[in-house]
Amino acid sequence: MSLEISLNPEKVWTDSLELIKSKISLQSFNTWLKSTHGISLDDETFTVSVPNKFALSWIADKFHNIISTAVEQIIGQPRQIQYLSRDEVAFAPKPSQTQVEVKEAPQKLNFETQLNSRYIFDNFVVGDSNQFAHAAAAAVAKAPMQTKYNPLYIYGGVGLGKTHLAQAVGNSVRERFTNLKVLYVTSERFTSDFIDSIAHQRTADFAKMYRGVDLLLLDDIQFLTGKEATQEQFFHTFNALHQAGKQIVLTSDRSPREIKGLEDRLLSRFQSGLVADIQPPDLETRIAILQQIVHSERQTVSFDVLTYIAKNITRNIRELEGSIVRLLAYGSITGRDLNINFTQEVLKDSLSSVSTINIESITKAVCAYFKLEPEQLKSKRKTSEIVRARQIAMFLCRKHTTSSLKSVGEEFGGRDHSTVIHAISVIEDESRLDLGLKRAIDDIENKLKA
């Protein structure tokens, strides 16, 4: 019996969507994938119908890997994924974006750069919040293995451009120095490759592949926490590359000193090069990011609308990008004018979910709970009650805002970042054992989210 007869493409797609739904936000799922259908399936290709060309391009670019993995799980075998818009114009995606990853026999580890060609310096919007990190990344890209920035460690909150910068370095080096071997991986991929190499007794191949590159870009290093064997392997990989004069670029959501669960010898090596942070973009930078996206899509949106979005979505570039793309998509589908009213209608869910939690609201909530005045938290007084309230406030600022350690310290009486780090560490450790402290934090958080 042929595969086409035994497997119904719509049923395969429905089952795949259930898997995909758990991997992405509900908003993204409803916007891009809810109206898609599986229309054909054979021994090589699975074809998916999407509403229009704009949605097709976005889905192929943003969700292809998730789709491929889900379809493979449902079918039990990999398939090439083809996207077809409703007007029956087939989309031919770039090979780097659409090639289905086929797991080879365990005897061999394949080398692939893993870079996304979309992430380049030309489309990275530079502002005060990321200028230093951008300059450092550009310097490494121009002269890999020749600067003192080795490793280059870039850290910042979710969706602020760390991955973009790291991959921009990789893409630039590949273009400038065609003889150099470049590899971009997430820490999850590094861990997975290491586990597979152990399972199939190919650790020598693993070491040869990772230690044989000229530029290693490792994303989200914080996810190595708690994985002792993987940390050991990365320690030796790091040393081998560094001693050979090879370039290393690391990204994380926090500074090296804030990462718990990583060996001290690793953390000390992370700080041996250059550590650069990325802060949330200011209003002007957010507007510039929106303008760039609109320009790249060859669309026109009024400055008032862009300013409205930028003022309401402040913490995360990824949210910012998703919102303008959603607006453009809805405008394309409905044909309506992209004015403020339409923007409010389309983005109501995004805008209503924008967090109003900031340092000021946290300070007020903590003071209300402990019956203190904000001035007391900012004072030099060190009574046990004030110290504990101040530590909780600093902990919540780090958890619920993207403010830098320096900014948080300045808000609480001009204290330095080491004081903030200590406060966060104390609360994290003690709240695991002290149920009263945990309840206090939970109560304050519930007030903040009310």
Image (spheres, helix red, strand yellow):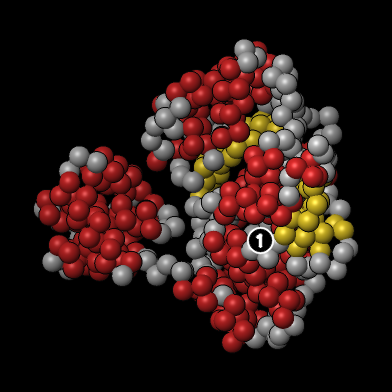
Of all residues shown, which one is farthest toward the right? 89
Q: Does 322 sit left or right of 221 as displayed?
A: right
Query: Image point 40% across, 41% down: which residue?
Result: 258
Q: What residue is rendered at 69% in x and 49% in y?
A: 12
Query: Callout 1: helix, strand or loop?
Result: helix
Write the residue at 63% across / 77% down: 306
Q: Is residue 97 left or right of residue 439?
A: right
Asked whether, in this view, residue 436 is left or right of residue 124, the answer is left
Name the quadrant containing residue 357: bottom left
| Mark 1 residue type | Leu
Provide the residue designation for mark 1: 33
Q: Is residue 239 visible?
A: no
Q: Is residue 27 visible?
A: yes
Relative to 61, residue 31 above or below: below
Between residues 168 and 319, which one lies in front from this camera angle? 319
Rate crowding at label 1 as few (under 14), some (14 to 19) or many (20 or more) other CA atoms within 10 Å.
many
Where is residue 30 drawn, in percent x and y? 60, 65
- Tell me residue 218's x, y (percent): 60, 35
Measured from the top left, where is residue 261 in percent x and y?
39, 32
Relative depth, front residue between 394 and 445: 445
Tell me: residue 96, above or below residue 353. above
- What residue is rendered at 72% in x and 35% in y? 77
| Quarter occupied by the N terminus | top right
For the C terminus, give its image quadrant: bottom left
Residue 219 sits in quarter: top right
